[in-house]
Structures are given as structure tokens and as C-alpha cells.
Image: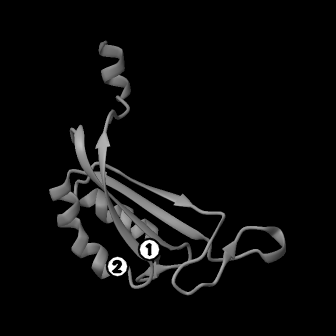
Amino acid sequence: MTRLHGSALRVTIFIGECDTFHHRPLSSEIVHRAHRAGLAGASVFKGVEGFGASSLVHTSRLLSLSEDLPVAIVIVDEEARIRAFLPQLDELVAEGLVILDECEVIRYVGRHNDKERRAR
């Protein structure tokens, strides 16, 4: 289990939900690669409205329902591990925005499996 506390780096990737990599949703490809790379965690958030470099507004409002809503993938880990993962994002993200932020991890605790829980 990865221990994470204190100074860390957050990478956020903004893409469209219709973006793909080899016929697979790009968000899923990024999450699975982050998992294989042993990063502390990754989450995908679906937006309800937004626009990017193309200036085209995508929205979930009924009258102008978009099929390509904004998606944000957030990954947090130690700086060295995030920076080592960035070349994979260069390969995957053809259109979108990738940003890095310094952050501080206050708490990072996973769920315990049932066997561990019963042993307490």
C-alpha cells in the first residue's frame, strides 16, 4: 500500500468524455495506466458544462444536450512519481489541458479488507 502524506503533486487532465485512445475511453486508459504505474490514486469527474481551446460550449442542459461533456481526471502522488508519469500523458492526450499543482496530503487511508477488519 502506498503511503502518502505531506507535500505532493496533483495532475489534473481536462478532456472530453468522447475522447478515445485505441477505441477505449481516454479517461479509462489514463486511470488504468496510473494504476499500473503504481500511483496513489486517480479519479474521473464528469462535468455538466464547459468549454476549452475550441471555444465550443458543451452542456448537459436538456435543450442543448451535448454528447461530449467535459471530464477531469485527478491524480495525486509524490512529485517524482507524478513527473515520471507525465510522458504517458504526452502520448495519450492529443487535445485537452494538463495542469500540475503542488498540494499537501492531510489524510490518505484506504479501505481495509474484511479479514483485516475482523482481526481488530
The one of 86 and 117 positioned closer to us in this rendering = 86
Q: Is residue 4 visible?
A: no
Report the residue that reaches farthest toward the top: 120
Q: Is residue 71 visible?
A: yes
Look at the image and tell me in which quarter the C terminus lies: top left
Q: Position of residue 95 (x, y in %)?
A: 44, 83
Residue displayed at 35% across by 56% down:
75
Q: Quadrant of residue 118?
A: top left
Q: Mark 2: which amino acid?
A: Leu
Along the horizontal axis of the image, is 67 left or right of 99? right
Q: Residues within 10 Å of mark 2 (few under 14, many from 20)?
A: some
Q: Are marks 2 and 1 in contact (CB under 8 Å)?
A: yes
The one of 36 and 65 positioned closer to us in this rendering = 65
Along the horizontal axis of the image, is 71 left or right of 79? right
Element marked by disc 1: helix
- Find the distance from the CA under tag 2 to the CA under tag 1: 7 Å
Residue displayed at 30% across by 61% down:
34
Mark 1 lies on residue: 26
Residue displayed at 84% across by 74% down:
63
Q: Position of residue 80 (x, y in %)?
A: 15, 58
Q: Earlier in the sequence, mark 2 or mark 1?
A: 1
Q: Position of residue 38 (x, y in %)?
A: 22, 54
Q: Quadrant of residue 33?
A: bottom left
39 vs 89: above or below = above
Mark 2 lies on residue: 92
Q: Mark 1: which amino acid?
A: Leu
